[in-house]
Image (cartoon, rainbow, N blue to C red):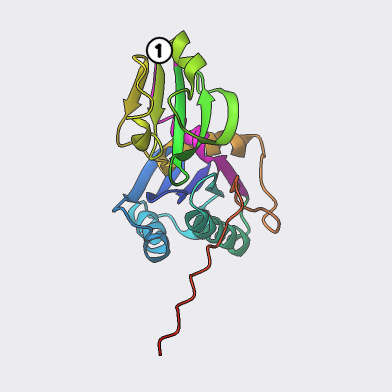
Amino acid sequence: MAIILNIETSTKNCSVSIADSGRVIASKELNNGNYSHAEVLHPFIAQILEEVAISKDKIDAIAVSKGPGSYTGLRIGVSAAKGLSFALNKPLISIDTLTSLSYAVSINKGVIVPMLDARRMEVYAAIFDKEHQKIREIKAEIIDNTSFAEELERGEVYFLGDGAQKCKETITHKNAVFVDDKFPSSIEMAELSYQKYNNNNFEDVAYFEPFYLKDFIVIPEKKKKPTF
C-alpha cells in the first residue's frame, strides 16, 4: 500500500489527485483557460485530503509533473511538491509530462504524439507506441506540413494535448487523428508514480528542478517615448 499525492501544473490544467497503490481515490482539476495554479493548488490539495480523510503525514510520497510545459506552471507545481516533501520528510517523485499525457488515450495500432503548446507554431512533442513506450525523445519543434511525415505514411498518428489543436490545419494527412480535450492530468500520473515508488526512484529534493527543455526568455518591455 502506498498513498501518493500527484501534482500536475505544466499547462493551464491545475490538477491534483490522491492515489492508493496506483488507483486514484480522489482528484480535483481546474482548466479555465488561465494559469490560476498559485491560487487554487494548495486549496485543492487540502480539499482532496479532507475528502478521503487522510492527513498530510499519512502520505507516503509526493509526485510532480516535471515538464516540459509552462515555465510558470512548472515552477509553482515543483515548488509546492518540494515544499511538502521537505516539510513532511517524504520522498519526491518526478513524472515526465508527455509520458503521462500519452496515457490519456488507448490505441490498438499506430503511434501517439502528445504535444504541448510552446507558442506560435512550436510544440514540445514526443512519440510513443501503442504500449506507451517512448520511441522518440522529446523535442521542441516547429510544425509544418512535413511534420511526422514518416510516421503518418506508416499508419495512424494520434495527436493530443493543447499543442495539437493549433496543428489541425497544418497536419492534414489522412492518417492524422486529433484527439480533443486531452490535457496533462494528475490522474494519468497515478500508476506511473506508483511504479517509481516501488522502484525507489526518487529525486533529490534539494537539487531537483523542472525540465523546461528551453531556457525561459524574458522579453523586455519597449521603452516609452518621452512626451513633451
Q: Residue furthest front?
A: 228
Give amino acid for label 1: Asn
Q: Which residues are magenta?
A: 92-110
Q: Position of residue 201 (x, y in %)?
A: 66, 39
Residue 150, compared with residue 9, is above or below; it is above
* Closer to us: 190 or 128: 128
Which residue was labeled with disc 1? 108
* Closer to us: 115 or 195: 115
* Closer to us: 182 or 106: 182
From this viewpoint, is residue 22 visible?
Answer: no
Q: Position of residue 181 (x, y in %)?
A: 30, 37
Q: Position of residue 196 (x, y in %)?
A: 60, 36
Residue 50, compared with residue 95, is above or below; it is below
Residue 10, compared with residue 115, is above or below; it is below
From this viewpoint, is residue 6 visible?
Answer: yes
Numbered disc 1: secondary structure: loop
Residue 136, compared with residue 64, is above or below; it is above
Name the quarter where the C terminus is drawn: bottom left
